[in-house]
Amino acid sequence: MTPRILPLLTFVGFVVAVNASAALPEAKVVRTSDRVRVELGGKLFTEYVYQGGPRPYFYPVLAEDGTRLNRDFPMKADTPGEELDHPHHRSLWFTHGAVNGVDFWTERKDTGTIINDTVKAIADGSVATLVSTNRWVGPDGVVHCTDETTVRLSAVPAGRQIDYEVTLKAPADRAVVLGDTKEGSMAFRVAQWLTPPHLFNKNKTDGKGTIVNAEGIRDAATWGKASTWVDYHAPKEGKIYGVAMFDHPKNPRHPTWWHVRDYGLFAANPFGKHDFEPAHKANPKAGDLTIPAGGRVTFRWRFYFHEGDEKTARIAEQFAAYAAGK
């Protein structure tokens, strides 16, 4: 009797697994002259804007039900209740504030620009994959480094996620120094309603949000701490929405430091050692990372967009799955 039951159970399990996969919404990519629109199940997830700005970025970023999770400014300046600070905080982006001494984080005439060269966009089942190549160009026209960025955007059973992988490449004839500064690097600017109460906001349009890291440290105290993950969540219209970011275990300097602010900035920064670590405050080069001439370095992060707080969304378990390659 046992030999008959086991194949049946195996087969049933196989059917369940296939059906669970099939239940995930299909991805679709639509490319125009300046962006790639990514849809999941016929609903907008985000757009990759690769032309017309100081660097490529994703905007907007929407939950499965269409709730906007990012701040609109500076792409849109008339959203009620939004603070108009830090115009370089463009929704979801990667850059750094000191590349061979050039600032690619802020946006001024004397700062650097990340110029897109190519973008490939493919939809396969529930996953959309974007592969882009970019040049990091200083205000004097010098190319300080290049990157190849691969982003996988997908629906998952409990939300949506973005896997972001960037490989920075040094020119063949010179090294690249990624300098020690808090101004960087893998970043997301959350919607105003996601923020916890804080003093920075002059309009008093604070949300009712919470920031928490893997060690259980909360809100403003998470700034500058090293951790494997951080979660930002808040209630809105009867539901709790959250954004978690995971630092991949293979990243240089894992677990990373977090440049996360209670006014809405949410960034992983593996370089700002002298800003984040009091013991190294006197050494402004403590966190420098040098890519040798012709060399490269790769960083990986996952954004997980979920419902519920860090416990109900099982963020620790989600990170463990990511760390295990799932």
Image (cartoon, rainbow, N blue to C red):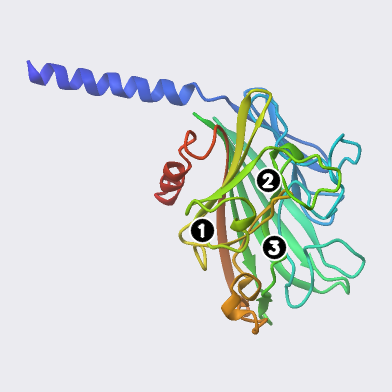
Which disc number belongs to residue 227? 1
Question: Element at badge 1?
Answer: loop
At x 69% / y 54%, what residue is drawn? 261
Amino acid at dot 1: Ser
Mark pair 3, 1: CA separation: 16 Å
Are circles 2 and 1 on residues that touch, CB within 8 Å?
no
Question: Element at badge 2?
Answer: strand
Name the N-terminal-most of marks 3 and 1: 3
**For mark 3, what is the residue?**
184
Within the image, what quadrant is residue 268 found in?
Answer: bottom right
From what the image shows, is residue 179 above or below residue 86?
below
Give the quarter of the figure containing the N terminus. top left
Does 157 sit left or right of 136 as displayed? left
Amino acid at dot 3: Gly
Q: Is residue 309 visible?
A: yes
Across and down, in percent, residue 296 comes to 59, 70
At x 45% / y 42%, what residue is drawn? 318
At x 60% / y 75%, what residue is drawn? 278
Within the image, what quadrant is residue 194 found in?
Answer: top right
**For mark 2, what is the residue?**
120
